[in-house]
Amino acid sequence: MRFYLSLILLLQAFITTGQETVPQVLSYSEYLAYVKKYHPMVRQADLQLEMGEAELLRARGAFDPKLEVDYSRKEFKGTEYYDLLNSTFKIPTWYGLELKAGFEQNEGLYLNPERTVPPEGLFSAGISLSAAQGLIMDKRRAVLKSAKALREQTQAERDLMVSDVLFEASEAYLKWARLHRELEIYEGFVANARQRFQGISRSAATGEIAAIDTVEAGIAFQDRLLQLEQTRVKLLKQKLEVSNFVWLENNVPVELQPSTVPDIQFLEENRFEIGTEEWTDDFSFEEHPKLLAMEAKLKALRIERRLKMNNLLPKVDLEYNFITPEPETVDTYDTSNYKAGLKFSFPLFLRKERGELKLAGYKLENAALELELKRRQIQNKVDGILQELDSYLEQIRLSQEMVENYRQLLNAEERKFSFGESSLFLINSRENKLIEARLKLNELLVKYLVTKAELFRSLGVPPQIPGETEM
């Protein structure tokens, strides 16, 4: 019996020693701030946004002014066959119109007559225009508009990625807080069991009660210590899980110190809302990131369809240029001196173009149906979560009443035991029920908070906790 008592006291001394370190509280808001700022997946989401900006920059490059120089020369056996220089400066504009300015200087013994120009060269200024296909929509404008839609899509997808990461981080933190609260519960009951064991041991030593009662009290004490140690191991594993979400600058991971503990103040039972409908009053489902991303995809598909429709038109390219050897003199620009051209092409059956248009229409219809389905799914999911939250509030209320009732039963049983009208078995039984009820209440509180975090993820916004200010 002495060895048995010594072993229990040694275990208790070991547990007490581990609690001497001053705890450092990591608040939920501080934790989420680190996740939102430094977590690699959040930074990956930011990279996606930057890639969308890069795509837009590349698309805008199709409208950059362009300088072209074409020079060729041939000389054979001391004879200059030709020396050709043709330079052009082009400025693309939005509606298929291109402004052009050029300089041409050609000479040589075997020069093609059509390339003959004055010795000082020939200057030109004019425009080129796509009069049919490409007038309303062309590939350059389609790519630019699609890139703008892609930027909107990447912004929405970035918000979704951040929302998912914050939910996973919140879930890990809340489980950590639940286990920390369980640890405190078990520590309280370990203290009660130790005190009861010591009192019964003294009473048995004086002969007031049977010595066998010390065995039952010792078993209860051991059971509480075992439950405490099992919870401690779970808490350690969950803290490592939380550490996966805590990073610093330059992708430096952070390992939480043994003295770091979660802030469990928001698990106070009296800080929970009675209703949940007001959470979505100011939220518009049309602003949901997932729906915004799908809307941006639809916008890109509409642009593609407009381009395919435009391809049904014939290609009619017109070009007109004033030409003069003396560009510095205004009166040398004469309408009788010009270079003009017309280029026309039109496929007779348009099978390729009509097929591409149909495919674009089917893609657009499919995306529109997918958008409506997703909108309905999100609404139903949010409604389901709101009902689940209301149910958890009712369960929490009932669980609180059960905890209070079990506490009263335990207190009454302890009073009866002090009068010799009860047994240690009944006290342990009442205490076990109280422990189960408190653990169940703690679990419900955390389930409620995790479900609320799931609600905010379903809405596409950062999660919040009662008592915490909005990030």
Image (cartoon, rainbow, N blue to C red):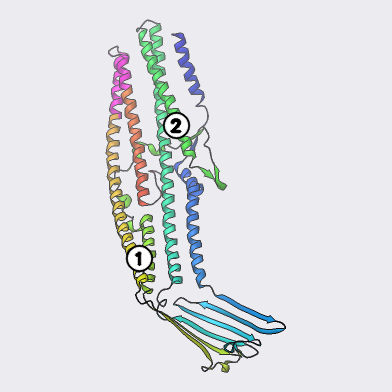
| Left or right, residue 458 beside residue 31 | left
Name the element at disc 1: helix
- Residue 466, image x, y percentages: 38, 43
Q: Indicate yes or no whether the magenta region holds residue 417.
A: yes
Q: Which of 133 and 467 is in front in this view?
A: 133
Q: Name the residue under label 1.
A: 360
Badge 1: residue crowd in 10 Å (few <14, some 14–19, many ≥20): many
Is any part of residue 190 visible from this angle?
no
Q: Where is residue 116 in the image (x, y as percent from the top left)?
A: 60, 89
Q: Give the range drawn in magenta.
A: 403-431
> SS at mark 2?
helix
Name the kind of residue labelled 1 in the image: Ala
Vertical arrangement, residue 244 with respect to residue 8, above or below: below
Q: Residue 235 carries which label?
A: 2
Earlier residue among tags 1 and 2: 2
Q: Is the magenta stretch mostly helix, strand or loop?
A: helix
Q: Is residue 428 magenta?
A: yes
In this view, 240 is above or below 378: above
